[in-house]
């Protein structure tokens, strides 16, 4: 009896002591976790976020510079004259360029003077190697800088930027022609234009589209800098509802911004969405303000054959101003067609009198 009482007494004491020890261990573990979380927040998270807040604007500015240099690169490829911007800018910003477009544009482009061996062709060829190399080198330097700050970039950003870097490395801008021996004579193989780089530049353009849609148009700092391109992109991609929403957001967020560009595209979106009365109201409001016609000619071009637009133009602009607008559009359309026909003729020459054909 006494022995049982003794066992019961000490068993309870042992159980109590075990619970105290166990409770103390859990408490220590819990306090250690809390201390680690607080330490991590104070000495890791807060300093990291401070650095990120300082470095992200730099990273995003670099991304915008990459976008800018890529845009110039593609515009250079599609130019018909060295000092004149290309007629493919809206198509480029609208993500509408095809591999065939690149193939045609590159027919009259060469790296340097060393490739102008046929004096008959020289007047039709454009030397773009140094300028291309300059822009691609700038892009590479910017990519390397951003990748060195990878801690402050998302995984998707790093993967895309790395793909851009790898694609740029594939582009070959030879300094001198590679001659081949033919019947004991050195012969320059044709084509010797940059046509061979068609796929490389087109693949770079696809990455450019990805850069634009996933980074440039989604970050607020970059979005504000490139709002016009974003609107053009949505419009030419036939995403009229998104284009309309984007315009309305900009008008609300930046009420002091010149609204001519925005209102013209908003009117065109309403027309595409069959909101004819809204189109009439908007286009009337814009034209009454008499914005400069030539500067907005590409926006007007698509709607010049609509009666209400013609009537409003005649009401608020002189015949001379309207004629200058129409003449400029006709001239540029003719120049674009001449450029494409000329380059198809160059293809025919380079490919032994074979008519132009291209398979995507």
Image: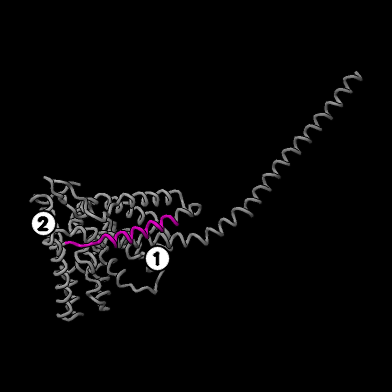
Residue hosting label 1? 224
Residue hosting label 2? 345
User: For the point 10% across and 56% down, which residue is it?
Assistant: 345
> Is residue 137 part of the magenta span, yes or no?
yes
- Residue 339: % across, % down: 15, 62
User: For the point 24% across and 55% down, which residue is it?
Assistant: 176
Q: Is residue 182 above or below residue 138?
A: above
The answer to whether residue 50 shows anywhere in this view is yes
Which callout, 1 or 2, points at the residue further toward the start of the chain?
1
- Residue 210: % across, % down: 34, 52
Q: Distance between the residues labelled 1 and 2?
A: 43 Å
Left or right side of 300 for 227: right
Main SS category, magenta section = helix
Q: Nearer the viewer, mark 1 or mark 2?
A: 2
Q: Which residue lies furthest to the top in this view?
A: 1
Foreground residue, 49 or 24?
49
Q: In this view, does 183 lie above or below 17?
A: below
Left or right side of 302 for 227: right
Element class at badge 1 = helix
Left or right side of 152 for 252: left
- Residue 94: % across, % down: 27, 58
- Residue 292: % across, % down: 25, 77
Q: Which residue lies furthest to the right in this view?
A: 2
Q: Quadrant of residue 128?
A: bottom left
Element class at badge 2 = helix
In the rendered view of the protein, which quadrant contains the N terminus?
top right
Q: Is residue 116 above or below residue 257?
A: above
User: For the point 39% across and 50% down, which residue is it?
Assistant: 160
User: For the point 33% across and 52% down, which residue is it?
Assistant: 168
Q: Give the range drawn in magenta.
A: 125-145
Foreground residue, 349 or 282?
349
């Amino acid at each position: 009896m006494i022995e049982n009482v003794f066992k019961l007494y000490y068993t309870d004491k042992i159980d109590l002591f075990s619970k105290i020890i166990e409770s103390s261990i859990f408490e220590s573990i819990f306090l250690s976790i809390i201390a680690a979380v607080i330490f991590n927040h104070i000495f890791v998270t807060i300093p990291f976020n401070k650095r990120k807040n300082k470095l992200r604007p730099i990273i995003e500015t670099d991304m915008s510079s990459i976008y800018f240099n890529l845009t110039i690169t593609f515009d250079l490829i599609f130019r018909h004259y060295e000092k004149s911007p290309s007629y493919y800018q809206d198509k480029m910003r609208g993500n509408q360029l095809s591999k065939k477009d690149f193939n045609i544009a590159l027919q009259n482009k060469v790296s340097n003077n060393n490739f102008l061996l046929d004096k008959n062709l020289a007047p039709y060829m454009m030397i773009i190697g140094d300028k291309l190399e300059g822009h691609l080198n700038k892009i590479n330097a910017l990519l390397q800088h951003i990748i060195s700050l990878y801690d402050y970039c998302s995984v998707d950003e790093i993967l895309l930027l790395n793909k851009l870097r790898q694609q740029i490395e594939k582009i070959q801008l030879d300094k001198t022609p590679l001659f081949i021996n033919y019947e004991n004579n050195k012969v320059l193989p044709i084509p010797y234009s940059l046509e061979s780089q068609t796929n490389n530049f087109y693949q770079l353009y696809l990455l450019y589209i990805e850069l634009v849609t996933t980074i440039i148009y989604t970050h607020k700092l970059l979005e504000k800098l490139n709002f016009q391109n974003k609107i053009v992109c949505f419009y030419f991609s036939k995403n009229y509802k998104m284009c309309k929403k984007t315009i309305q957001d900009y008008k609300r967020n930046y009420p002091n911004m010149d609204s001519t560009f925005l209102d013209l595209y908003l009117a065109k979106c309403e027309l595409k969405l069959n909101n004819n009365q809204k189109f009439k109201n908007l286009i009337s409001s814009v034209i009454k303000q008499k914005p400069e016609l030539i500067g907005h000619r590409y926006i007007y071009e698509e709607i010049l054959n609509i009666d209400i637009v013609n009537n409003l133009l005649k009401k608020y602009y002189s015949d001379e101003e309207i004629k200058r607008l129409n003449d400029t559009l006709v001239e540029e359309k003719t120049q674009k067609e001449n450029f494409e026909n000329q380059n198809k003729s160059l293809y025919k020459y380079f490919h032994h009198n074979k008519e132009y054909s291209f398979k995507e």
